[in-house]
Image (cartoon, helix red, strand yellow):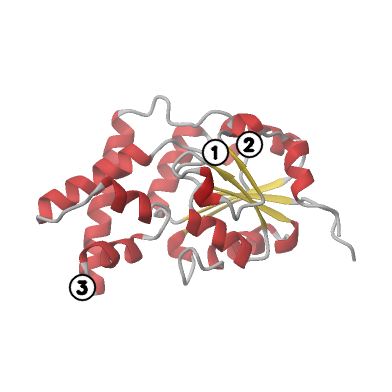
Amino acid sequence: MAVSGLQAVIWDLDGVIIDSAQAHFRAWRRLAEEEGWKLSEEDFRATFGMRNDRIIPLLWGEMPPERVRALSERKEAYFRELVRQNPQGLALPGALELLQALHEAGIAQALASSTPPENIALISELLGLQRYLQALISGEMAERGKPAPDIFLKAAEALGVSPSACLVIEDAVAGVEAAHAAGMRCLAVTTTREAEALRQADLVVPSLTEVDVGRLRALVPAS
């Protein structure tokens, strides 16, 4: 049976729906300072979008899994503290409007983010994301993190939609690679990376205010 074009949109969270880069950087920097480690903004930007269990060994060397887990939990607790302190302006321009428009168009939507489930729950509560999304998939639910396709394939499975009928919205290089590895089209937003770094995406835009449902449909033609 032929696939009738776009049937589902799978959203990343950080840098796509919410402007969280600064809060994440501040949380990582606090952790690094407490541990006596160095963390440059370049280090942060290069690893943004990856799972913590990959970021920590990349930046500060191999260590026991339980140590990585403890550090990750501390960092995410710092992040949630910062978000609760300043929830205003959390949503990026055009994100909630596009979520609403896709919902009204009857297109299934899921969130698939490397961020822990506690972060997803907090953001969903603050922004009311459950109104639009049929599935919430965290990095902990996937065997491998981005750029492996696992998290996006899990989201498609949860929605009951073929990967070829899905469009991913991402802001990270690892996310674009994961989307294509999953056999999905990808829209990239230049909120955290420059357009050149995201050139492998099927469409690159500076803001979600630049796109509407029709433009997303055009990225996933009927087959």
Q: Which residue is labeled 2 in the image?
A: 99
Q: Secondary structure at mark 3?
A: loop
Q: Which residue is labeled 1 in the image?
A: 129
Query: Which comes before the other along the chain, label 2 or label 3?
Result: 3
Q: Is residue 26 left or right of residue 92?
A: left
- Crowding at mark 3 (Cα within 10 Å: few <14, some 14-19, many 20+): few
The quadrant of the rendering that contains the C terminus is bottom right
| Residue 78 in view (yes/no) | no
Name the residue at 33% across, 65% down.
53
Farthest residue toward the front? 196
Mark whose residue sits in front, 1 or 2: 2
Q: Is residue 172 left or right of residue 210?
A: left
- Crowding at mark 1 (Cα within 10 Å: few <14, some 14-19, many 20+): many
Name the residue at 16% across, 53% down.
38
Name the residue at 48% across, 43% down.
194
Please report contact status of discs 2 and 3: CB closer than 8 Å, yes or no: no
The quadrant of the rendering that contains the N terminus is bottom right
Q: What is the C-alpha distance between the residues marked 2 and 3?
A: 40 Å
Please state which amino acid type lies under the numbered disc 3: Met
- Crowding at mark 2 (Cα within 10 Å: few <14, some 14-19, many 20+): many
